[in-house]
Amino acid sequence: MRFQLAAILTLSASLAHVNALIPVFPQHSFNNGQEGGNSGNRTLDVDGFDRPEVGCGNIPDHQQVNKRERSFRRMRQAHRTSGRKPEGVSFSVHWNVVAADERPEKGWLEDWQIRKSMEIINEDFAPVGVRFELSGVNYHKNPEWYGRGVMNDLPFDQQMKPTMHVGDNRMINIFTLGDGPGGKRGFLGYSTFPGGDLGQDGIILNHNALYDGNWDGSNLGHVLTHEIGHWLGLYHTFQDGGSCSGAGDQVGDTQIHKEASWKCNSQAPSTCGAKDPVFNYMNYVDDACRREFTQGQIDRMWDHIELYRS
Ligand SMILES: [Zn+2]
């Protein structure tokens, strides 16, 4: 398979300013495996009728979650600094724009759309105490990559990402692609969890799921917030779905629920006794519903920052 960078352009200096990460914890060096998803399109009964839905591609199975959690618990025991709640941290963001050509509808993002995306994630993560600073944007004109779509195709990811990845484990690399072959939409996006191989680290997003994109219901900018939640160690609120008694998303104060929610209207279900968390960023709900992390999720993100991204 041929992988070429037909063009790599660096955005204007106005956008490509560099802001260093402000570390609040001492440096560590850790490694463990990447996890990915394995599910494609799905059809769920939403609002009384069936319609195809695709969500985020971070769908680790029970075994993968158990493996990650064992490693996480060992890390916490070995490097325990719990109770030291930080005042805040800033992560640098490097944006890898993959486009079929230089038209916005073909993935060639405009300055304002990237700036707006940064504004939104900073608003969303303000209660967490995390800020994001854009450090650079590289444009890659590559129709083949753009047209592969966001499919959580591990061999493809493994070949593509290292050619563009910039920075260390504190730099969020965002890779924006298009729809898949034949216009198949694929996933909104997916992210690596903390602690994986550096060259594979980052978030892959369909550019149509950015603010003002053409993905109805998922174009208010919060899909990126959701993916950063994964990048900082969060699972979906419906992780381990199907059971109302398991560990769920490993967070104590999120309501466990059996399956992904898609809407936050009055029909929102209560699949495990109490109302499903239809306003949580880590559910599959439309962007208009996404508005909160729980304190438990915030604590879990800070544990992961401390252990893996400091
Ligand atoms: Zn997700």
Image (cartoon, grey):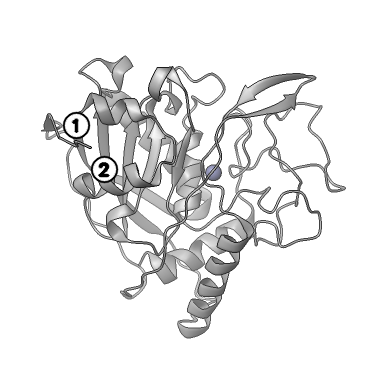
> Residue at image x 51%, y 73%?
71
Dot 2 falls on a residue whose secondary structure is: helix
> Residue at image x 36%, y 25%?
178
Query: How far from the left and from the top, in percent, is residue 101?
Result: 21, 18
Mark 1 and mark 2 lie on one chain; the one further toward the N terminus is: 1
Q: Looking at the image, is 74 positioned above or below residue 299?
A: below
Q: Contact (CB < 8 A) between labels 1 and 2? A: no
Residue ID for mark 2: 160
* Displayed quadrant of residue 141: top left
The span from disc 1 to disc 2 (Cα, nearest Å) is 14 Å
Mark 2: few, some, or many residues within 10 Å (few <14, many ≥20)?
some
> Residue at image x 50%, y 81%?
80
* Displayed quadrant of residue 136: top left
Residue 134 visible in the current orientation: no
Residue ID for mark 1: 139
Q: Does 65 sit left or right of 80 as displayed?
A: right
Q: Does 187 sit left or right of 239 as displayed?
A: left
